[in-house]
Amino acid sequence: MTDALKRLSDEGVAIWLDDLSRKRITSGNLAELIDQQHVVGVTTNPSIFQKAISGGDGYERQLTELAARKVTVEEAIRMITTADVRDAADILRPTFDATEGQDGRVSIEVDPRLAHNTLATVAEAKQLAWLVDRPNTLIKIPATKAGLPAITETIGNGISVNVTLIFSLERYREVMDAYLAGLEKAKERGLDLSKIHSVASFFVSRVDTEIDKRLDALGTAEAKDARGKAALANARLAYEAFEEVFSSDRWAVLDRAQANKQRPLWASTGVKDPAYKDTLYVDELVAPGTVNTMPEATLDATADHGRITGDTVRGTYDAARAELAAVAALGISYDEVVKLLEDEGVEKFASSWNDLLKSTEAELKRLAPSEG
């Protein structure tokens, strides 16, 4: 066992766990990861909850009570997921206090079926913040076109946000603009900007998966040489954009009002291709002021054999541009790929949510008390 996780943390990368379940909470596992593996936050998404609740561990008692009350399946899911997020937030509260609100946070996502509805997303964000009722919650809003004004309004209401499903550099700049606009709105409303936090979840491995598939179809030596480079290049150029926006004159005004930078969060950091090192998207995305949210397998792999050698992002921007240009020169459209990935991401989370609705509905029927 190396101390790679400590070194990663010391380099300014906050380590968050990309998973949550009731069993992880009640068994003491989450507390153990915080204590021993430098975990300082938790992210969830509809796929994670679908897997956890469908797995059944620890949910039967609450489901039985919900069935007795004859609640709708949507209400049941919200009661179950917000309970898990609330309990995880309580476990992470000491970290939240120690980092003055920077870390110790748990994310919960708005209903993914609302991804293209601005008003409904804002309303859902308010409802989730009220239901969880913990200051160390982040409400996840997808970075769709309809999500951007929802981000601004939610931040403007003083609710901290995790912007998810970011794939393109253009969309990432729009996300940062939406965050700054939200802070400006909150400032106009007299809110305390120091209490508002945000991360921007920039997805990594899925970019390589899609682009590598297209490179493999080409089958040339040049295509083979370009494999496994696009995702890191994309993420590194996102960090360049982050540095630019958060050193601007516009940011300086908000900074003087005690606003917090919206940190880049590396998401989808589990390696999908077994040909690549399983810690690739951790070792090669080390930069100060970032978050890396990892599935437990990636966390364990990093602890065991991660190679943290210092900052691997700053100073790489020209090389990153050249790597994306090489992919484009082979006829692979960056814009087409990132649009496809955003559409698929929204669809995947909505599909997981629908699966969760079906499986929870079946459990509520099974556990319903007999009439009479």
Image (tube, helix red, strand yellow):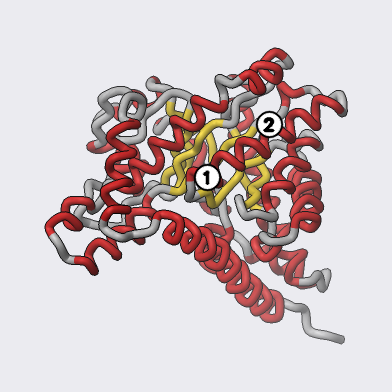
- Is the residue 253 above or below the residue 203 in the image? above
Q: Which is closer to the viewer, label 1 or label 2?
A: 1
Quarter of the image where one finds residue 137: top right
Q: Identify the secondary structure beneath mark 1.
A: helix
- Is the residue 246 above or below the residue 285 in the image? above
Quarter of the image where one finds residue 321: top left
In the drawing, does residue 242 fall left or right of residue 314? right
Give me the disc on residue 61. none
Instruction: Please state the horizontal and vertical placement of residue 256, each as a whole percent of the image.
Output: 70, 13
Give me the disc on residue 170. 1
Q: Are marks 1 and 2 in contact (CB under 8 Å)?
A: no
Name which residue lies at 49% across and 38% down: 265
Q: How many marks?
A: 2
Name which residue lies at 24% across and 32% down: 307
Find disc 2 in the rendering and name its residue.
180
Name which residue lies at 39% across and 47% down: 269
Identify residue type, mark 1: Glu
- Is the residue 77 above or below the residue 10 in the image? below
Q: Identify the secondary structure beneath mark 2.
A: helix
Identify residue type, mark 2: Leu
Quarter of the image where one finds residue 71: bottom right
Q: Is residue 29 visible?
A: no
Name which residue lies at 66% across and 40% down: 161
